[in-house]
């Protein structure tokens, strides 16, 4: 079974659900709360890919995993980040805005960064990136579902609210299903590389959320905003990374998707631990 036929519908549903929860007035937070937005976007769009690049060199990852690690770091925020923000007592509206902004901005940044990374380590071993196909796939799977969701939200708000509640509950189980199927198909390769690659993605998550938390404190974000920034920077859209890696129109490499699979597992462990700690100390303003 080719997992691309599973990940594509999941990714489309996740982006459609994001559109259902969006309001144009949400983007006003960019002007009303510029520092939380700036720190989160810097952490996600600049810091995370830069750290991934450095760790890929440090851990001497083979080209296919090198590119896969940079790929997951380039992707936008995960669709479940607003749920995690709510559990952590964060700013849910800010979380939705950041996920939407990163989803739009990465339509342009992913082709640029991945083209550079592929030329850096991939072309010497036969890995190439058809940039045009990448842009087309992202527009179809990312932008169009979001726009459709926004349209339904404004045309039929009550129906949109009901669909959003259902899809939000389905998001995590669907991603878990994808990871399970992927693991069953590639368990030998995953187990052979889980040591160094698992450590690499864990360090990536911890360093990125640590620095983003520090930056949030430096610009004096509120505790609620800091929690949201940490979660947004740490939670990436693994489904999109898997779709790009395994798509026959782009990299056509399920092995390249393994870093995204491991990242998805570790980000949930790390962020659930973070949420648990926050819920214990919430109200003290220390996190």
Image (spheres, rainbow, N blue to C red):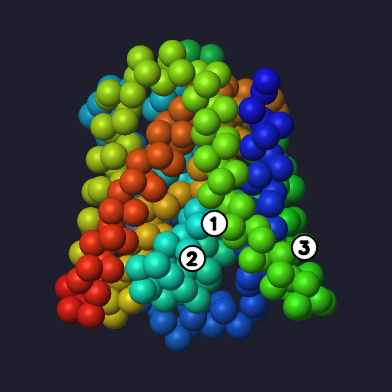
Q: Residue at x 57, y 79 (%)?
A: 26
Q: Looking at this view, is 24 or 3 the one in front?
A: 3
Q: Quadrant of residue 153?
A: bottom right
Give the label, 3 or 2, closer to the camera.
Answer: 2
Q: Looking at this view, is 203 or 158 the one in front?
A: 158
Secondary structure state at the residue bearing disc 3: helix
Asked if one can make out residue 273 in the rendered structure from this viewpoint, the answer is: yes
Q: Is residue 108 left or right of residue 212?
A: right
Secondary structure state at the residue bearing disc 1: loop
Asked if one can make out residue 215 in the rendered structure from this viewpoint, the answer is: no
Q: Residue at x 71, y 69 (%)?
A: 162
Q: Residue at x 57, y 37 (%)?
A: 177
Q: Is residue 129 left or right of residue 283?
A: right
Q: Residues within 10 Å of mark 2 (few under 14, many from 20)?
A: many
Residue at the disc numbered 3: 148
Q: Looking at this view, is 102 or 83 the one in front?
A: 83
The label number, if any, that marks residue 79 in the structure image: 1
Could you say where residue 256 lies in the image, as x and y percent from the top left? 50, 25
Q: Is residue 105 left or right of residue 195?
A: right
Residue at the disc numbered 2: 82
Give the label, 1 or 3, closer to the camera.
Answer: 1
Picture quarter with the C terminus? bottom left
Could you say where residue 75 lies in the image, as x and y percent from the top left? 50, 47
- Residue sticking out furthest to the bottom: 32
State yes or no: discs 2 and 1 in contact (Cβ < 8 Å). Answer: yes
Q: Residue at x 52, y 21 (%)?
A: 184
Could you say where residue 190 lies in the image, as x and y percent from the top left? 41, 21
Q: CA distance from mark 1 to mark 3?
A: 16 Å
């Amino acid at each position: 079974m080719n997992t691309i036929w599973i990940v594509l519908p999941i990714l489309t549903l996740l982006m459609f659900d994001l559109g259902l929860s969006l309001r144009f007035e949400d983007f006003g937070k960019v002007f009303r709360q510029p520092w939380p937005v700036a720190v989160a976007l810097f952490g996600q769009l600049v810091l995370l890919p830069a750290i991934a690049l450095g760790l890929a060199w440090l851990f001497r990852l083979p080209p296919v995993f090198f590119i896969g690690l940079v790929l997951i770091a380039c992707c936008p925020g995960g669709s479940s980040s607003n749920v995690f923000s709510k559990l952590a007592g964060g700013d849910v509206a800010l979380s939705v805005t950041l996920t939407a902004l990163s989803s739009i901005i990465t339509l342009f940044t992913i082709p640029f960064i991945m083209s550079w990374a592929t030329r850096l380590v991939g072309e010497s071993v036969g890995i190439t990136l058809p940039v045009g196909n990448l842009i087309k796939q992202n527009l179809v799977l990312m932008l169009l579902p979001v726009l459709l969701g926004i349209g339904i939200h404004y045309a039929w708000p009550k129906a949109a609210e009901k669909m959003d509640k259902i899809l939000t509950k389905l998001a995590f189980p669907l991603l878990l299903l994808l990871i399970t199927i992927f693991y069953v198909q590639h368990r030998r390769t995953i187990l052979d590389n889980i040591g160094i690659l698992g450590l690499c993605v864990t360090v990536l998550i911890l360093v990125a959320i640590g620095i983003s938390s520090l930056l949030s404190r430096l610009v004096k974000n509120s505790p609620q905003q800091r929690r949201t920034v940490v979660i947004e920077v740490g939670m990436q859209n693994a489904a999109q990374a898997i779709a790009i890696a395994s798509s026959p129109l782009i990299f056509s490499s399920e092995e390249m998707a393994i870093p995204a699979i491991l990242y998805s597992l570790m980000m949930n462990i790390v962020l659930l631990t973070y949420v648990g700690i926050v819920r214990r100390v919430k109200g003290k303003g220390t996190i």
